[in-house]
Amino acid sequence: MLNILLPLLREDRELFNAADKNIDGKLDEKEFLAFTHPEEHPDMLPIILHQTLEEKDTNKDGVIDFQEYIGDKDCDEELTD
């Protein structure tokens, strides 16, 4: 269970720190919105992109292929063409 929670906590900490613009360890209303809805805040997009690519890159080669993108390793071979 801990091995599942730790990566999620790391991601949340990364988002929290990015949203905490005044670096006071607390989130005001504006910062909280950026933390809870990062996709709606342009300055949060690089973090979302990094986290998403890291999650999808199952073989950890730094890029994602189509199979990694769709996330289904057992799909029809037609999809790999």
Image (cartoon, rainbow, N blue to C red):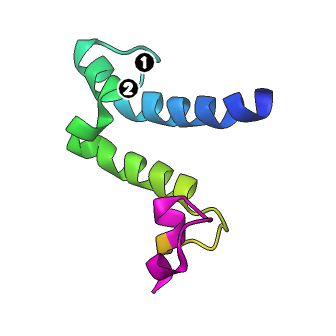
- Badge 1 element: loop
Q: Nearer the viewer, residue 76 or 45?
A: 76
Height in image: 64 above or below 2?
Answer: below
Region rendered in magenta:
67-81
Instruction: Please state the horizontal and vertical placement of residue 48, each as a whole percent of the image.
Output: 39, 46
Residue 62's x, y, as percent? 57, 71
Check residue 24 in the rendering and tell me which mark sits there, or answer none.
1
Q: Residue furthest bottom?
A: 81
Report whether residue 21 is seen. no
Q: Is residue 79 magenta?
A: yes
Q: Nearer the viewer, residue 13 or 66?
A: 66
Q: Residue at x 63, y 74 (%)?
A: 61
The amino acid sitting under disc 2 is Asp
- 58 with respect to 38 (left or right): right
Left or right placement of residue 9 versus residue 21 in this view: right
Q: Amino acid at mark 1?
A: Asp
